[in-house]
Every structure is written in C-alpha cells, then in structure tokens.
Image (tube, coloured by chain):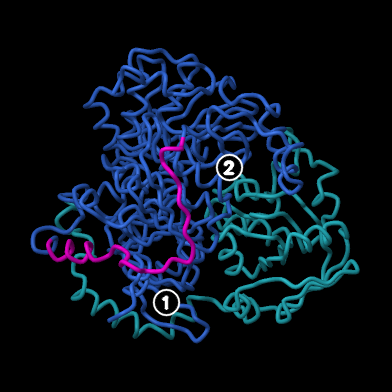
Amino acid sequence: MTAPRTLFDKLWDSHVVGRRDDGSCLLWIDRHFVHEGSHHAFRKLSERGIPVSEPGLTFGVADHYVPTRGRARSGGTGTAGIENPTIRGMVTTLEENTKAHGIHLFGLGDRRQGIVHVVGPEQGLTLPGLTIVCGDSHTSTHGAFGAMAFGIGATDVAHVMATQTIWKKKLKVLRIRVDGRLGPGVGAKDVALAWIARLGADGARGHVVEYAGPVVEGLTMEGRMTLCNLSIEGGARCGMVAPDAVTLDYLHDRPFAPKGDEWEVAEAAWRALASDDGAEFDREVTLDGSDIAPVVTWGTSPEDAAPIDATVPDPDRASEERAGHIRAALDYMGLAPGRPLDGIAIDQVFIGSCTNARIEDLRAAAAVLKGRRAQVPGLVSPGSSLVKAQAEAEGLDQIFRAAGLEWVESGCSMCVGMNGDIVAPGKRCASTTNRNFRGRQGPGARTHLMSPAMVAAAAIAGHLTDVRPMLEGRT
Amino acid sequence: MSGWSRHEGLGVALPDESIDTDQLIPARFMATPRAQGYGRFLLHDLRHDAEGRPLPDFPLNRVPDATILITGRNFGAGSSREAAVYALVDAGIRAVLAPSFGDIFAANAINNGLLPARISSGDMERLTGAMPDRLEIDLMARCVTGGGLQALFELDPVWQMKLVNGWDDIDLTGAHQDDIAAFATADRIRRPWARPAAERSLS
C-alpha cells in the first residue's frame, strides 16, 4: 500500500527523468509553447548551434505583438500589413524561427491563432497529466485540466528546446477549497482576487495551488482556467484542478486530443489523477464562496483588491508595513483614501486577455451590455480567432458594437501593450486582465482589474459599480 | 557563465515593495536584442520623468555605481520576462536583497548569475537605513556585511551551488542524455496519448 498522493505528486512522479544528489529532478516536458517573446531563447540555441530536440512537442503561437486591427486587409501570413517595423520584426522572427526548427506555428494568418493560453486548450494540446511550459507566467492557466503547467524564463526555454526537460526542485502544495455557492454576478475572477487579497501577492510563493471544493467543481473549464491563470498573481507557479467529467467533455473531439482507443486509455489515466483520500497538503486554506462579492482592484498589485461595496483603504489606518505601499499606490492611481470604490469614474474599458476572453467571458459581458449603451469607449479582443468566430455566430459582436465598443482581432493586446494597444498616461481603465502593475497597460495607465460582467457594468455606468442590480431580470 | 562566491560593492536601497517585472523593464523595450544592452531600460519609468529625463533623486540615479540592491517584499513579481534580470545585470547589479521574490524572477536571476537573497524584513529595514554604503556578500556563508551590520540570508542550496560554480543547465543535462532517451522511449508505450495527435490535425 503506497502512501496517498496529491494530484501534484502524481504529475511530478510520472515525469522524473533523473535526480541529482542535491534534490533537484530532471523533469520531462510534454508540451512547450513559444511566442514572439521567445526570440532570446532561439538566439541562445543558435549561438550554441543546438537543434530543437522534440519539435513535434513544441508549438508556436503569435499573440504578444500581433495587431488587433487591419488584419483582414493583409494577405499571406498577414505580417506584411503590420506598419510598425519593430512589431512586424517580432512576428516575422517567430515565423522564421519556428520554420527553421520544424515547429508548428499558429501564425497571424491562421484561423486558429489566438492567445497561447486560449489556443492550447482549444486545440486539445493541453491535456490532463501533462507537463506544460511556456515563456509566459500565465502558463499556470493550463493547470485547469489537471496538468502541471508553469511559466519559465528564456534560459529555461532554451533548455527545454534543447533537451525537452527542465531541472526543478519539488514545490509545496497549497490546497484552496472553495465551499458554498457563488451568488449571481460572481465568478472565477472574483474568487481568485478574493484569495489573493487575503493571502497576498506572494502568499502562495514556493507552492502550487490545487483548487478544490464544490464551487471549483461547479465551474466550467473557462472558469477553472481563469482561476488557474491568476494563481501566479498570488505567487504560485502553478494552479491546478483535478480532471473530472467537465474536463473530459471539454476535451472530447478537440483536434489534437487523443482519439478512439487512445482516448479510452487516456481517460482511465486521467481519472486516476485526482488527489487520493488522505493525501497531505503542505498548507490548506478554505474560502466560503457565498461570502464573495464582485471584486475590483484599487491599487498597483493584484493583492490590492476589495469587494465593490468597500472603500479605498486609508494608509493611516493600515499597518506600518503596508502603509507605504498603499500611499504610493493611491498616489499613482489618483484615488483618495476612504472613498467608495463604487462610483470611481473611468475613461475606458478593455475586455480581453488570457484571463478573461474566452467565449463564456464574452457571453457574460454581453449579457450585461445587451440593449445598453457604454458611457466610455472600449476595446473587446477575443481570446482566439476561433472564439471570435463563435462569438460572431452567436451575435455577441453585434451587442458589443451596438453598445459602442470596438470589436477587434485576437491577441494579448491591451493586457500587456506590446502591440501598441495602450491606455494613455493618467487614463483609468476597467479591465478584465490580470495585472494592475504601474505602467502595465501603458506608461502612466491606471488599471482596475475585475470580471467581464463587472467591466461591462463599468462601461454602462461610466464608473466602477456593482453589476448585480444590472443583472436583475436577466439570466 | 563564471561562478562567484564573494562580492564587494556599493549597496543602494529601494525600499518600495512589489517592484514588479513590468517596472523592472517596461514591455515596450523587450524587442531589443540583448547584445545592445538592457541596463538603460532598468526601472526606466521610475528613473525618468515623462520626457525621459533622469530624476536626480531616484536612488539608482544618486548611486549609479551600485552593485547591490536592497528592496521590499515581492520583488520581481509578475512576468516570466528574463529581460527583467538582463536589465539588472546589464546595469551592473550582482545581488538583490529582499524579504521575498517572485518565483520565476528568482529562477531567472540564478540562470544569469544574479543573487536573489532573502533577508528578514527587520534586516531589510536596518540595511536600508545604512545605505548607501559598501557591502560584502559571502555566498558560502550566506551572509552580507557592511554599514556596521551583518545579516544572514536565505538561498536554496541548489541555487547556491549553481551561482558558486557558474553551472549552465544545458551543459549539466548533457550527462543525462541517455536517461532522457530512455524515458522518451518508455513513455511512448506507457502514455501513448501524451503525444499530440498531430498527423490527424495539422492538415
């Protein structure tokens, strides 16, 4: 009888290639995603004259720098139409590098192009039981399928390309249970920001987070991806959810997922992944989902988050340790201590990013916006080109357009501002993204993070506000 | 990469907490080839005014020769961009002392010979009060001395050895080539489903 193991233990044990005396393990990597930002790593390989060892396990996606406007006009792979030469260079360099190494690319002209953390799951490249890495911290998203998925830097990207492995010391496991039930207008984004506000942006440092409990089991794959995506904002390298019927339903018939007999074998393996009864966690935290209200951020770290019916914190009433950060954050954000969060006027909205731009997110925003008009301008960038097509088939694009928002192509867009979609200095944006860091959406930009439904509500009101009254009488 | 076990240099304090990767290097600079140097991008939007003029009072502008940075908790949180480490290293920084670090940042730092040393909040405050001053770091003793103070720091022993020896993971992994090949072969049988069903999907 072996000791009960956690989901993380099982994932770890099944990928150990070798061990060193110092306790580090060499882990096999099942999937590796690269994007325009991977140019440093490709250069490291070429400097050493090393080939990619398993090009069939590496996939390229153009997302960080791609334009979100004017793409329909440019022919071929679509890069020729990019006006900014630096941005065009980033996208064409990815094309050249993936081609040179025999790596399949979901490029700019591909109908399956989108944000890497949306495309991977959508294509069935992300599966339970896999190790998945990418040079992007939000790789934690893929853990929603019961995979061990984490972001890595350029040196490690080059190592994975060269060896299909990575050196790692085993992490600790924090289980976050969410009991009870979420109220109407409350979703995965609110759960994530609620735990990060409670534990801190470094609260889960050195841990992977396994999410469990009835609220998590009740989430769709889209919701679970949002939750796992934001794990890194609480300091955790990975988030994960044990695969169940919801996971299997999502994956069945996805293009790269196993088929036929192979699916049967896979399903049996995946069903055995859940943490065993009696498995021990290094740390456990429990939240009551019924207590969670829609959450917004007020500062410059994702931990600076509070329910919409709260007020902006007062540094004079905070601990000495915390007061300095609050003062600096409020100064940057242009907010006075003690004022209600509800009513903070915004200049624009953004609906997009690997956190909240999947079909369910767009539906949630559209459900609030339908038949209403936004008081401020805004951008809606779907998580992938396939999500965009699906949303258009459902008529969601018409709802966004009728509300006065701009419906654009898919990419990382205004979440990271690399493609030129930025918030102007001093402007305030209600955003479905993942980081409210200083300058994240552009130099001097002021970001308030919240769910797609809450962004829609802010667009209609012209200020931060509680979405729940706007949902009354709507499903 | 060459290893190191001692470093003596000028320390500078930046006592803010949560100095994230997007502040260490704003995204708009990241298309630049590394060969051009990343030091000028370090904390760019904190060090300069809106017109791009250096702010004379910013600690790193007052102590441009600093090689050791003392800062608040959650340093390097956020993005996996190794460019955040390149900016520090290219600006001459050899060690960052803080109560906590973003995990990916810390791993990237080690891969580039930069020490992410965890010190207690109390030591952080005491050292901050004593800066700028010369400091000496002893990696094997996990100790920083200077400004009339001495503080022990935490560092994963695996990372300590990597820094001291200047180990490169790709070189180290070379010794495991046979293990990797054996794992891959056995894994194709053990988990046939784990490889992407590529042939059926790429058309």
Image quadrant containing the N terminus of chain B: bottom right
Q: Position of residue A472 (x, y in %)?
A: 35, 18
Q: Gap between marks 2 and 1, in whole Å?
A: 34 Å
Q: Badge 2, how many Cα within 10 Å: few under 14, some, many 20+?
A: some
Which subunit holds the residue at mark 1? A
Q: Badge 1, how many Cα within 10 Å: few under 14, some, many 20+?
A: many
Most foreground residue, A283 or A462: A283
Q: Residue at x 41, y 69 (%)?
A: A280
Q: Position of residue A25 (x, y in %)?
A: 44, 77
Which of the labelled discs sits on residue B28, or is there none?
Answer: 2
Mark 2 against mark 1, which lies toward the viewer? 1
Which residue corresponds to mark 1? A26
Q: Residue at x 58, y 57 (%)?
A: B102
On screen, residue B11 versus residue A168, left or right, reads right
Which segment did they paint magenta? A264-292
> Residue B97 colored magenta?
no
Helix, strand or loop at mark 2: helix
Helix, strand or loop at mark 1: strand
Q: Amino acid at mark 2?
A: Arg
The hue of chain B in the figure is cyan
The hue of chain A in the figure is blue
On screen, residue A71 versus residue B165, left or right, reads left
Q: Position of residue A28 (x, y in %)?
A: 35, 72
